[in-house]
Image: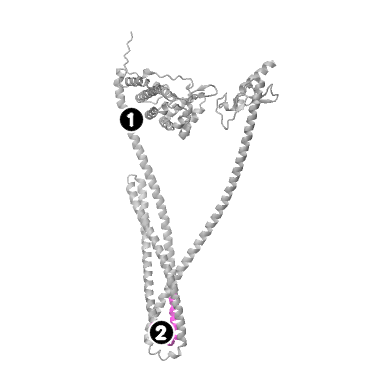
Amino acid sequence: NIQINWKWEPTDISRNLWALCLSAFRDPMAMERANLLNMAKLSIKGLIESALSFGRTLDSDYPPLQQFFVVMEHCLKHGLKVKKSFLGYNKSLWGPLEMVEKLCPEAGEIAASVRDLPGLKTPLGRARAWLRLALMQKKLADYLRLLITRKDTLSEFYENSAVMLEEEGAVIVGLLVGLNVIDANLCVKGEDLDTQVGVIDFSMYLKNDIDDYRSEERNGQIAAILDQKNYVEELNRQLNSTVQGLQGRVESLEKSNSKLIEELAIAKNNIIKLQEENHQLRTENSVILMKAQQRLEVLLYGDLNCELDTYKQSRQGLDEMYNEARRQLKEECQLRQDVENELVVHVSMKQEMEMAMKLLEKDIHEKQDTLIGLRHQLDEVKAINVEMYQKMQSSDDNMRQKNDMIARLEEKTNQITATMKQLEQRLQDAERERASAEDGVRKFKQDFTNKADSLQKQIAQREKQMMQLETDLKIERDWRQTLQNELERERETIAQLTAEAQQINGLKKEFHRLQDENTQLKGICEEQEQALEELGCKLSEYGGQVWLKDKDATHCKLCEKEFSISRRKHHCRNCGEIFCNSCSDNELPLPASPKPVRVCDTCHALLLQRCSSNAT
């Protein structure tokens, strides 16, 4: 007499049984979904508890792991549509799992390794191997989550009330996330996955009094371990995100730093050029002053008498002209002073930019050493960059103002040249009247000497301004020449692009011609295939064998490999079945055709055996 002390858990299983009984009167598919959901919860919970208490890597012989795969197989089979194949009607579990490869490129390695396994011959065996490899990768939940989100593709394989298309499928996928704490090492090659019988063993989920106490302790340990794992994963994610953000900021700072260095180099070159031009202008001004003094000495000592007479007659007009010239000279001096001040400010700004660049380099080295202080330093660098950008904008505005000033100075130089011409004409008139003005020269000699000195100074200043304006005009002409060169280069690039566009049009025409040839070849191929089918039907009428149509065969009859563009279909001329090239790579003469024709491997062996028996 053996007494069994097994006891049902009143909290979980009894409630599930009541729910199942109530749902049985409503919908049988809903009852099946509820049963599968409860079994998935029990199997996943039991597998996590036993794996954490086991404390080692799980292998294929571990019973809770085997039961988990059986339950998952039942969940994935629920509501599968029956498909008609060459051998009859079947439910293929490998079809929806094979679609994961298209949704997630990472699953391509699993699918390729499953197809390459030599011991697997059925789609069910491939599906079982795929589940085991996905569990070892710890991505089973991720792959199935991608699959259940694409309900349009799942509807081709499952009925509307299947587990994978309802809310229960999402709950099961959420429970599978907990399996990421388990490490499994499964050998798929040695197992016979094609002939395994998937039967759920309910005795593993029955508990006694001793197991209740142990399970509570294990649940506490598992909860603590899972909380620690989730906390560590969350910390790791936050650290990764912060590190990536800091790396992006450092890269952006390096780019901005390189741009600022290039701008500084350009500014230094411009300053050097301006200094050289300033030196040239000073030398030219000194030469012009010497020449002007010589001319004035000649004019003063040679033509004083005639000039005094002319000044007596047009003294009032000359006074007005002198006042206007003085006023213009004062304005031009003020403009020159403003330009010099702006140049000084520009040089100081360049120095500040160099100092800021040095500070930026020091900050970058410190940031690479310490990641903690990067945020504060990045804010400072951003503020400096904003200030530098504003300064650059202000310098651009100043350059525009200087260009406007240059234009105004050009207009003023034109006016001064006109006045100089008028003065020359008046001097010529004064030479004619020289004879009549000799007596009055002596009386006004002293007054004239003072006025001549002031006029000499004014003329020297105007000649200096003229030289400055001429140098500015030379600079503007050089700039226009550079712009013309750039325009010529752009025209050359446009011509090259037009030539490339013509080449592309030629390639398009060639592509359309190849498309037409492809359509013609496809039509010829279809006609030849139709002729082969008709020839096969005639051979079947004479020989008695059935000539299988091309559309009825999707896989090779011997190796069961799927036909594709690279793996073509070939009829056996003896039996009429369809095989791939490797399984029908034989030729023998038949009674219907004296020439050797294509036969499959099995027919080749039978025909050779018959020939050998007939020969004996």
Amino acid at the residue labelled 1: Leu
Q: Quadrant of the N terminus?
A: top left
Secondary element type, mark 1: helix
Q: Does the magenta stretch include residue 33?
A: no
Whether residue 22 is visible here, answered yes or no, is: yes
Identify the image quadrant of residue 597. top right
Q: Where residue 527 is drawn, which disc sits there?
A: none
Identify the image quadrant of residue 43. top left
Q: Where residue 226 is drawn, which disc sits there?
A: 1
For the residue pair 320 and 452, the one nearer the viewer reads as 320
Q: Is residue 326 above or below residue 30?
A: below
User: On the rendered structure, is 215 left or right of 480?
Assistant: left
Secondary element type, mark 2: loop
Whether residue 278 is visible here, answered yes or no, is: no
Check disc 2 and report the residue beneath it: 314
Q: Does the magenta stretch include residue 291?
A: yes
Residue extending furthest toward the bottom = 439
User: On the rendered structure, is 580 left or right of 90?
Assistant: right
Q: In this view, does 8 lie above or below 370?
A: above
Q: Position of residue 125 (x, y in %)?
A: 48, 24
Q: In which quarter of the image is the C terminus?
A: top right
Identify the image quadrant of residue 468. bottom left
Q: Where is residue 583 in the image (x, y as percent from the top left)?
A: 60, 25
Separation of marks 1 and 2 at Cα, in angstroms: 109 Å
- Magenta residues, as a range? 288-316
Determine the residue positioned at 60% across, 45% down.
509
Q: In this view, does 431 lie above or below 398?
A: below
